[in-house]
Image (cartoon, rainbow, N blue to C red):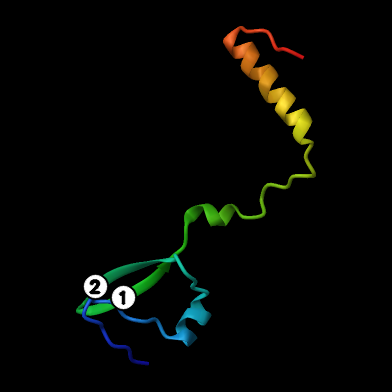
Amino acid sequence: MQTTITSKYQTTIPKAIRQKLGLSVHDTLEWDLKNGTMVVKPRKASFLRFRNIVRIGPGDIKRDIHKARKLRATRTGTDMKP
């Protein structure tokens, strides 16, 4: 496959390569030179390896707000108003 470098030094990653590597918009590429050859590798954000590790159930927003306010009042030494 072949692409052209534009006047702004940009190029297009061919669709077959994007699909094979699972690349999408805003992904990062790492560029390197090895023995005169350009090597380009996808660089996935390291936090993605933790995807689906934490499981949570449905929340209760009113209870969570109440707990947060109570905790803040405890930290600041002020009383909570009902």
Q: Counting residues from the N terminus, which is met first, the one under dot 2 or under dot 1?
A: 2
The crowding category of the residue bearing disc 2, from other C-alpha atoms within 10 Å (few below 14, some 14 to 19, many at least 20), is: few
The crowding category of the residue bearing disc 1, from other C-alpha atoms within 10 Å (few below 14, some 14 to 19, many at least 20), is: few
Identify the residue shown where x is 44% and y is 66%. 27
In the rendered image, which quarter contains the N terminus?
bottom left
Q: Amino acid at mark 2?
A: Leu
> Distance from label 2 to label 1 (Cα)?
6 Å
Residue 45: give x, y in percent of width and height.
Answer: 47, 57
Q: Note whether 19 is above or below 77 in the view shown.
A: below
Question: Is residue 35 left or right of 76 when viewed as pictured?
Answer: left
Question: Is residue 75 left or right of 15 when viewed as pictured?
Answer: right
Q: Amino acid at mark 1?
A: Val
The tag on residue 62 is none
The tag on residue 33 is 2
Q: Note whether 55 is above or below 32 in the view shown.
A: above
Residue 28: give x, y in percent of width and height.
Answer: 40, 65
Q: Which residue is mark 1?
A: 39
Disc count in the image?
A: 2
Identify the residue shown where x is 49% and y is 73%. 23
> SS of the residue at dot 2?
strand
Identify the residue shown where x is 78% and y is 29%. 63
Identify the residue shown where x is 26% and y is 83%. 5
Label pair 2/1, CB-CB below 8 angstroms: yes
Residue 20: give x, y in percent of width and height.
Answer: 51, 81
Question: Is residue 65 left or right of 3 when viewed as pictured?
Answer: right
Residue 77: give x, y in percent of width and height.
Answer: 61, 7
In the rendered image, which quarter contains the C terminus?
top right
- In the figure, residue 71 lies in which quadrant? top right
